[in-house]
Image (cartoon, grey):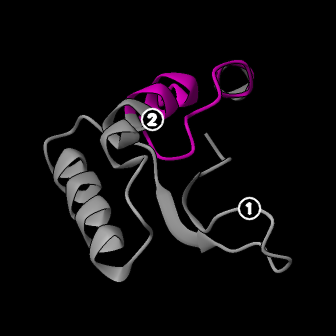
Amino acid sequence: MEEDAVHDAIHEHPFYGVEIIREEQQRYIQGLLKKYRNQPVSEELKKKIWDELQMEKHYGRITIPFKMTTRRDPYGKYPEMIEIILDTKV
């Protein structure tokens, strides 16, 4: 039994049950979102992006859990933007 404990300690299981390479997923998502870069932030745009990311997740091309939020600069120096936050547990 001690061998099993040592083996499990050395070979840690991925948090979500599968290996997710965060950098690859981030590059893929950034590539998808380039086409939306110059569009004004709106609820319609958020829905388009969300639907596309969910479809990519459905097809298995996105495996990392994520959240979507709108970032607003309270001082008005920077434009409003949609931010995709990737899970940090991977």
Tell me which numbered mark, 1 or 2, is placed earlier along the sequence: 2
Q: Position of residue 50 (x, y in %)?
A: 30, 64
Residue 81, by quadrant, is bottom right
Instruction: Tell me the quarter of the image containing the N terminus.
Output: top right
Residue at image point 77% right, 72% down: 73
Along the line of sight, the residue nearer the viewer: 86 or 27: 27
**Range shown magenta:** 6-28
Which residue is the site of mark 1?
A: 78
Marks 1 and 2 in Cβ contact (< 8 Å): no
User: From the viewer's perspective, is 3 left or right of 41?
Assistant: right
**Amino acid at pointer 1:** Tyr
- Residue 77's place in the image compared with 2, above or below, is below
The C terminus sits in image quarter:
top right
Callout 2 amino acid: Gln
- Where residue 68 appears, x then y in whole percent? 49, 66
* Camera-side residue of 21 and 42: 42
The residue that disc 2 covers is 30
Q: In terms of secondary structure, where does tag 1 sit?
A: loop
For the point 51% across and 33% down, the residue is 26
Q: Nearer the viewer, residue 15 or 73?
A: 73
Q: Is residue 37 left or right of residue 7?
A: left
Q: Secondary structure at mark 2?
A: helix
